[in-house]
Image (cartoon, rainbow, N blue to C red):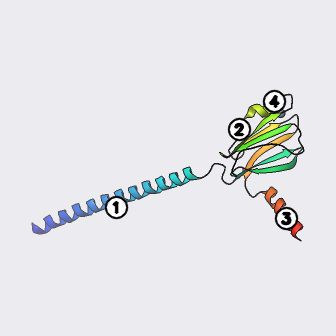
Amino acid sequence: MANSKKTVTNWKLSKKALIMCLVAAAVLCAIGFVITYIYAQNQPNGEGLQAEIYVDDTLAMVVPLESDGSEIAEIPSAPGTHYQHVTSGCIRILSNDCNEQTCVKTGWIDELGETITCPEKNILIKITPLETKANILQDNQENTAQN
Ligand SMILES: [Zn+2]
């Protein structure tokens, strides 16, 4: 009798231990998710993204979206077209002297792969990851200048 009772007690204990392990694992998972979520929330918007601005299929300029400050500027080689970039990682065409104005109406873009196009003036703004060919091109130019 004593033996069987002991066996039952051990089985109960191990079941309790198993549940404790599962609960502990669940809690660890939850903590992991919370930490990841908080970390993601603290990332500045636009991190790792840039806006490439093409005029006539030629890269006119690159605006890093994670850069500080708000700026309004005219796109070089596209007179009359002004873009605006703000710290929240988004960019838009603020004003354009084109007739169709769909590029202006497109509004803000802030996600990878999003684009603004102005068919009339052949302007394309697209959001790409940082360190694309544009950066490499710039680095090469800087290296050439140093040499
Ligand atoms: Zn337009």
Q: Nearer the viewer, residue 143 or 13?
A: 143
Residue 99 coordinates in the image, percent (x, y):
86, 28
* Mark positioned earlier in the residue sequence (3 or 2): 2
| Residue type at numbered disc 4 | Gln
Q: Nearer the viewer, mark 3 or mark 1?
A: 3
Proximity of marks 3 and 2: CB atoms separated by less than 8 Å: no
Residue 30 coordinates in the image, percent (x, y):
43, 54
Residue with the mark numbered 4: 101
Q: Nearer the viewer, residue 19 or 57?
A: 57
Proximity of marks 1 and 4: CB atoms separated by less than 8 Å: no
Q: Nearer the viewer, mark 1 or mark 4?
A: 4
Q: CA distance from mark 4 to mark 2?
A: 14 Å
Looking at the image, residue 140 sits to the left or right of residue 51; the answer is right
Q: CA distance from mark 3 to mark 4?
A: 37 Å
| Residue type at numbered disc 1 | Cys
Proximity of marks 3 and 1: CB atoms separated by less than 8 Å: no
Secondary structure beneath label 3: helix
Establish whether ligand 1 lies closer than 8 Å to the Cβ of label 4: yes
Instruction: Write the residue at 36% across / 59% down.
Output: 24
* Mark positioned earlier in the residue sequence (3 or 1): 1
* Residue, far left: 1
Residue with the mark numbered 3: 142
Few, some or many C-alpha atoms within 10 Å of disc 2 (few <14, some 14-19, many ≥20)? Answer: some
Few, some or many C-alpha atoms within 10 Å of disc 4 (few <14, some 14-19, many ≥20)? Answer: some
